[in-house]
């Protein structure tokens, strides 16, 4: 898909990925260190620090492993989202009117062109390329890397639409492969987040309702609840954004179908619309649940149900 869409934000995406990973590692380390010192404070009088470290080191290592797996899911979803946005940019450029310099920018499917001499009709869509006539001028590729001009073949409207449809289908294939390979992992992670949220919120309510009312312990439980919610949104948000962006793709294709286009281009757009109808970009957790924002409401509802049951049958000390 990259050979068709030509993403132009690779450096920015790389920086964002590195920054996100750095923030995750630093924030997780700070939370785990604070949690360890809290256990030293609470259990230090009854047992040794070495025993506390040995008791919790496995849990802390598991937290790092789960976060790295969640980062992988986030990164894959973000990569699909970038390419969907780039696809929609190309479709939007097909909708807008052309300009006198053939409306091609860096990263466009037709590469970067410079028009030398002649006139171009700017009223037609598709970068005003259909009106180019041989002999009226020369259309050459401008290569910023090689600093030289080469003859370039101009893609027609229907060829561009076909390439964009192929790019979309490749993105659908990538999402399906991700669902097959990492769907079970995602289901395990979501289940783990649900259980940890139940335990953290239950510990917070018990501490606030009990006689001890340790402020630091209650604050730590609140931090853990926030951490687990952030972990859940790390899985959900990229998938939800991809679903929304794919809906924008459908809207743009519908707008193109309603515009003044040739019959051959309309045939390709009809095929694109059918592909959008039959091949949807959706993320699933091992086929058990759709990974979108509705999952967050389901998790919150499950936590509320379990808390009501636990608080009814377990009396806090």
Image (cartoon, helix red, strand yellow):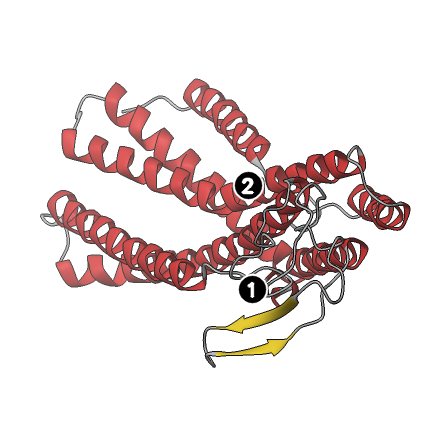
Residue visible at 38% across and 58% down?
12
For this rendering, which residue is in front, 183 or 44? 183
Residue 114 — which label? Answer: 1
The span from disc 1 to disc 2 (Cα, nearest Å) is 36 Å
In this view, the residue in front, 259 or 177, is 259
Q: Is residue 46 left or right of residue 317?
A: left
Q: Is residue 66 left or right of residue 108?
A: left
Query: x, y (%) of residue 292?
Result: 58, 38
Q: Residues within 10 Å of mark 1 (few under 14, many from 20)?
A: some
**Front one among 68 and 265:** 265
Residue at 52% in and 42% down: 236
Which mark is first along the chain, 2 or 1?
Answer: 1
| Element type at mark 1 | strand
Could you tell me which quadrant the C terminus lies in? Answer: top left
Give the number of the mark in front: 1 or 2.
1
Give percent across and percent down for residue 159.
79, 59
Residue 241 is labelled as 2
> Horizontal placement of 279 versus 182: left or right?
right
Nearer the observer, 191 or 107: 107
Q: Position of residue 224 (x, y in %)?
A: 31, 40
Quadrant of the snapshot with the N terminus: bottom right
Circle 2 packing at 10 Å, graded few (<14), some (14-19), many (20+), is: some
Left or right: 163 as drawn, with respect to 73: right
Identity of the residue drawn at 36% across and 21% down: 315
**Residue 89, can we see it?**
yes
Residue 27 percent location from the top left of the image: 25, 51
The structure residue drawn at horizontal position 32% and vertical position 24%, both measured from the top left corner, is 205
Vertical side of 191 occupied by 176: above or below = below
């Amino acid at each position: 898909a990259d050979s068709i869409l030509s993403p132009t934000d690779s450096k920015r995406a790389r920086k964002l990925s590195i920054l996100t990973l750095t923030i995750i590692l630093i924030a997780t380390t700070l939370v785990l260190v604070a949690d360890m010192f809290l256990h030293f404070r609470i259990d230090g009088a009854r047992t040794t620090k070495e025993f506390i470290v040995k008791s919790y080191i496995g849990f802390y290592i598991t937290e790092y492993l789960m976060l790295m797996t969640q980062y992988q899911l986030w990164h894959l979803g973000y990569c699909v989202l970038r390419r969907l946005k780039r696809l929609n940019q190309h479709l939007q450029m097909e909708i807008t009117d052309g300009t006198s310099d053939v409306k091609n920018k860096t990263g466009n499917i037709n590469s970067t062109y410079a028009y030398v001499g002649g006139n171009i009709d700017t009223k037609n869509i598709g970068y005003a390329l259909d009106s180019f006539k041989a002999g009226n001028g020369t259309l050459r590729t401008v290569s910023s890397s090689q600093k030289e001009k080469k003859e370039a073949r101009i893609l027609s409207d229907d060829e561009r639409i076909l390439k964009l449809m192929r790019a979309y289908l490749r993105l659908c294939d990538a999402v399906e492969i991700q669902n097959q390979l990492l769907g079970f992992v995602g289901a395990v992670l979501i289940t783990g987040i649900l259980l940890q949220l139940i335990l953290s919120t239950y510990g917070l309510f018990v501490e606030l309702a009990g006689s001890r009312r340790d402020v630091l312990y209650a604050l730590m439980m609140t931090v853990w609840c926030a951490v687990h919610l952030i972990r859940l949104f790390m899985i959900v948000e990229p998938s939800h954004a991809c679903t929304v962006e794919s809906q924008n793709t459908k809207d743009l294709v519908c707008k193109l179908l309603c515009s003044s286009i040739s019959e051959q281009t309309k045939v390709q757009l009809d095929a694109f619309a059918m592909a959008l109808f039959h091949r949807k970009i959706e993320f699933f957790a091992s086929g058990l649940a759709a990974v979108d924002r509705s999952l967050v409401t389901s998790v919150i509802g499950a936590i509320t149900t379990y808390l009501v049951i636990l608080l009814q049958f377990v009396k806090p000390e």
